[in-house]
Amino acid sequence: MDFDRQTSKVFVQMLGDLKVVVPGESSLPQKFRSRTAERLLSWLALRLGQSMSKGELLDQLWPDSDGVQQAQNLRRAISDIRKVLESSESPTIAVMNQGDRIWLEAELFTTDVDEFKRLTNAGLEGINPEASLRTAIDLYLGSLSPGDPAPWLQVHRMELEERFSQAVDHLIVHLLNLGRHAEALRIGRQAVIAAPLREDVHIALMRAYASAGLKLQAISQYEELETLLINEWGEHPSAKSVRAFESLDEATPPIREMSQGGAIRVGSPFYVERECDRLFLRGIQNSEGTIL
């Protein structure tokens, strides 16, 4: 999801699939030749402007390789990144490599992670909370570098997932307090697609369903969470999720909607989401070219 970024900077998207857009080039994301280059760029982009020791970097990115192989991996990755980022239209050296230190120049880059952190900080601190949290949630297209099991990534991944869960919960509560059930449900459905294994996100959506008087959908959401956790980790929902499920009867009494027949109104909280809807939304968020 785009945000208001300067066109003179390289944009690095790390939430969901890694994508890089270079100023002056095609608006299509640039491709790297190796996973090694993507991993190095992610490491440096998460620490924009910070000069890092190569020894620390090598041990984190390639812990199972010897010193010679680590050095080769680093040189290859730097070369690959520079070929992509340092085009003829953008000749400035983006990857700084001096002595034992390496870094990305902060003034040449912008990242979705930095913007996501800025927006969640603002929203959770009460600074234009609705707009800040909405934009932050739209930026979160998935977990950080999904599929990469590296421990150093896991630390950042967990922090960002926690921020996302808090943003979703705060915004849904805010919307429900204003009686804007349809918007709260839309946010919740979007969130469980972006973070399907976060129990807090499912709990927030369950409460939104219950508050809108849609108890059957709330129960169905709990069952979906239970199935996901069993299939992924062989675990059942936590005690917190069970308590939320058991408290569904305490939710706000059902809201009512007059029906004149025909198609249900746009944005109605009574719309029952189907599996094809979720696949469709996921395709849009992943910028897929053709959706049947």
Image (spheres, rainbow, N blue to C red):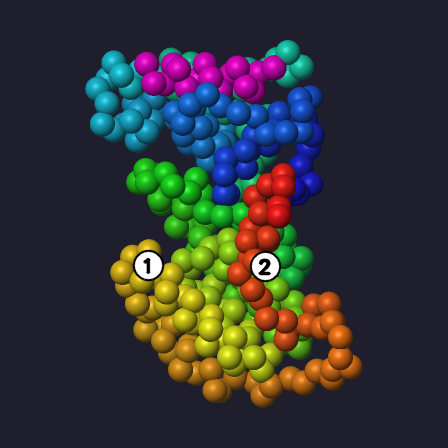
Disc 2 residue type?
Asp
**Secondary structure mostly seen in the magenta stretch:** helix
Q: Is residue 204 visible?
A: yes
| Part of the protein shown in magenta | 72-87
- Residue 187 in the image: state x and y as whole percent: 59, 62
Q: Secondary structure at mark 1?
A: helix
Q: Residue at x 70, y 82 (%)?
A: 257
Q: Secondary structure at mark 2?
A: helix
Left or right: residue 152 compared with residue 188: left
Numbered tag placed on residue 277 in the rendering? 2
- Judging depth in this view, the residue of 88 and 182 nearest the camera is 182
Q: Residue at x 63, y 57 (%)?
A: 134
Residue 180 placement: quadrant? bottom right
Magenta includes 78?
yes
Q: Which residue is mark 1?
A: 231
Q: Residue at x 51, y 56 (%)?
A: 193
Q: CA distance from mark 2 to mark 1?
A: 22 Å
Residue 200 placement: quadrant? bottom left
Disc 1 residue type?
Asn
Query: Nearer the N terminus, badge 2 or badge 1?
Result: 1
Left or right: residue 61 compared with residue 142: left
- Residue at the limit of the structure toward the front, as seen here: 292
- The crowd level at tag 1 (other Cα within 10 Å; few <14, some 14-19, many 20+) is few
